[in-house]
């Protein structure tokens, strides 16, 4: 048994199920509806200079504490800092990070930090919706996420095999990412842990089958499908067959190479970290290298640290630090950072004042008044701080930044018109972002780092 080949191998049964659903939507949308991609490209031409070709969104679902990480307040005392009272310098003068981020501290010239992000919403679902759509929850329409908008306006990637909107490894589930755009724009979730070993015995993948056997099974199934063969000229059946072929190409054909981390040097995989998040970051780099427009990494395990906060931070922050630092350095080395936006945030932050009362016993609660976001690449400058929180990290002190400002800046760098109309199935008026006159609050685009 060869246990040395660690590959990001999606379980074939699960991946084919996911792939068939996703590609069925793509194919059926193309055959049975008008060509949505062509229509939206004609309706919404690129605006300005397109600097970002791809986006990697690292979503810290549950909300990561800003005090302990990217906006340390060492002078605020034990009630606010607890065990993490130390701040460390970075390779950019004047910028400090929490002590749990020594690797990112070496890469501070490659990213900027927004320390005045705010929306004052403390609900997981509603805050996630605001952060990923730029729209207010409770409106009559359920808007698509930024990833779904990219899938709408950007062409499918890697020879049309890999969907334009990919999630590693599971959808976050706090809201419907595709919104009213429908299943055609739902993200493709890879499912399997890319850090899990892939064992082979004479070419047979554990818990799987050889490619030849897979092919013979498909051929046998096709021969037995006499009813479907009789309806081959039917548009719906033909679309279903196209979807199956596209799914097999994704999992068993050329598309599989993009997901195969064994093609990377072991020392590079070590640099990212042989843990789920580190290998997610490496997989994301391979996807943008293949031309995937929008990749989301939903951080495994989450950051909802009402209790066991400090233990969770000690466990997770080193992995987050290693993975992001390696990703930024690798993108830079390959000449991809200039055309790839990386942004990292939760739906909100965590309360700056520690809750020492039972049952939390030193936890931090939901906090949307002020929190931090990391942005890098794709036209965003590195080595800068945007905005400021107050002395204890409880409120915005200068330059408030709202979700509509952050997403609007990403859209502009990617050449997507924020005023472009979205195709609502009932013909209702809908735009990528709310028109300026309809925005509840806005601090303006992040022009200081663009």
Image (spheres, helix red, strand yellow):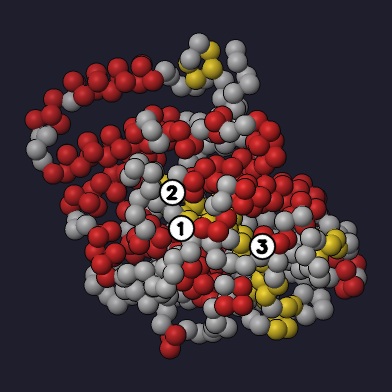
Is mark 1 in CB contact (under 8 Å) with mark 2?
yes
Distance from Cα at disc 2 to Cα at disc 3: 22 Å
Q: Residue at x 63, y 21 (%)?
A: 4
- The residue at which mark 3 appears reads as 111
Distance from Cα at disc 1 to Cα at disc 2: 8 Å
Q: Residue at x 16, y 44 (%)?
A: 236
- The residue at which mark 2 appears reads as 291
Q: Residue at x 80, y 50 (%)?
A: 314
Q: Quadrant of residue 256?
A: top left
Crowd band around label 1 with a 10 angstrom C-alpha radius: few (<14), some (14–19), many (20+): many
User: Is residue 206 at all visible to an observer of this figure?
Assistant: yes
Is mark 2 in CB contact (under 8 Å) with mark 3?
no
- Residue 273 locus on image (x, y percent): 69, 39
Q: Residue at x 34, y 36 (%)?
A: 247
Q: Residue furthest bottom?
A: 437
Sequence-first tag of 1 and 3: 1
Crowd band around label 2 with a 10 angstrom C-alpha radius: few (<14), some (14–19), many (20+): some
Q: Nearer the viewer, residue 104 or 78?
A: 104
Q: Is residue 274 above or below residue 141?
A: above
- Residue 9 locus on image (x, y percent): 50, 31
Crowd band around label 3 with a 10 angstrom C-alpha radius: few (<14), some (14–19), many (20+): many
Numbered mark located on residue 53 in the image: 1
């Amino acid at each position: 048994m060869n246990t040395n080949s660690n590959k990001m191998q999606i379980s074939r049964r699960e991946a084919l199920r996911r792939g068939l659903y996703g590609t069925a939507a793509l194919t059926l949308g193309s055959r049975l509806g008008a060509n949505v991609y062509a229509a939206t490209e004609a309706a919404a031409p690129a605006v300005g200079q397109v600097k970002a070709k791809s986006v990697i969104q690292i979503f810290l679902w549950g909300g990561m504490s800003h005090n302990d990480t990217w906006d340390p307040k060492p002078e605020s005392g034990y009630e606010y800092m607890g065990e993490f009272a130390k701040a460390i310098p970075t390779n950019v003068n004047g910028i400090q990070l929490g002590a749990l981020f020594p690797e990112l501290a070496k890469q501070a010239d490659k990213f900027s930090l927004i320390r005045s992000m705010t929306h004052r919403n403390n609900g997981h679902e509603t805050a996630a919706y605001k952060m990923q759509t730029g729209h207010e929850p409770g409106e009559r329409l359920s808007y698509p996420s930024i990833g779904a908008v990219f899938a709408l306006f950007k062409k499918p990637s890697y020879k049309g095999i890999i969907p334009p909107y990919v999630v590693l490894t599971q959808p976050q589930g706090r809201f419907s990412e595709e919104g009213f755009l429908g299943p055609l724009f739902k993200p493709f979730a890879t499912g399997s842990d890319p850090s899990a070993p892939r064992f082979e015995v004479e070419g047979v993948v554990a818990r799987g089958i050889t490619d030849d056997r897979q092919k013979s099974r498909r051929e046998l199934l096709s021969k037995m499908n006499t009813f479907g063969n009789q309806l081959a000229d039917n548009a719906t059946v033909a679309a279903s067959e196209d979807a199956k072929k596209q799914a097999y190409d994704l999992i068993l054909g050329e598309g599989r190479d993009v997901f195969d981390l064994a093609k990377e040097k072991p020392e590079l995989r070590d640099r990212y970290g042989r843990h789920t998040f580190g290998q997610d970051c490496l997989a994301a780099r391979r996807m943008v290298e293949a031309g995937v427009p929008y990749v989301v990494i939903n951080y495994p395990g989450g950051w909802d640290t009402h209790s066991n906060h400090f233990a969770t931070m000690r466990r997770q922050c080193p992995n987050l630090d290693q993975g992001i630092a390696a990703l930024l350095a690798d993108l830079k080395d390959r000449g991809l950072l200039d055309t790839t936006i990386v942004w990292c945030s939760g739906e909100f932050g965590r309360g700056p004042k520690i809750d020492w009362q039972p049952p939390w016993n030193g936890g931090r609660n939901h906090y949307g008044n002020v929190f931090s976001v990391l942005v890098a690449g794709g036209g965003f400058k590195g080595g800068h701080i945007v905005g400021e929180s107050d002395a204890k990290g409880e409120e915005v002190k200068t330059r408030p930044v709202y979700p509509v400002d952050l997403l609007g800046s990403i859209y502009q760098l990617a050449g997507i018109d924020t005023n472009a109309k979205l195709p609502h199935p009932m013909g209702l008026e809908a735009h990528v972002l709310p028109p300026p006159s309809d925005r509840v609050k806005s601090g303006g685009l992040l022009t200081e780092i663009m």
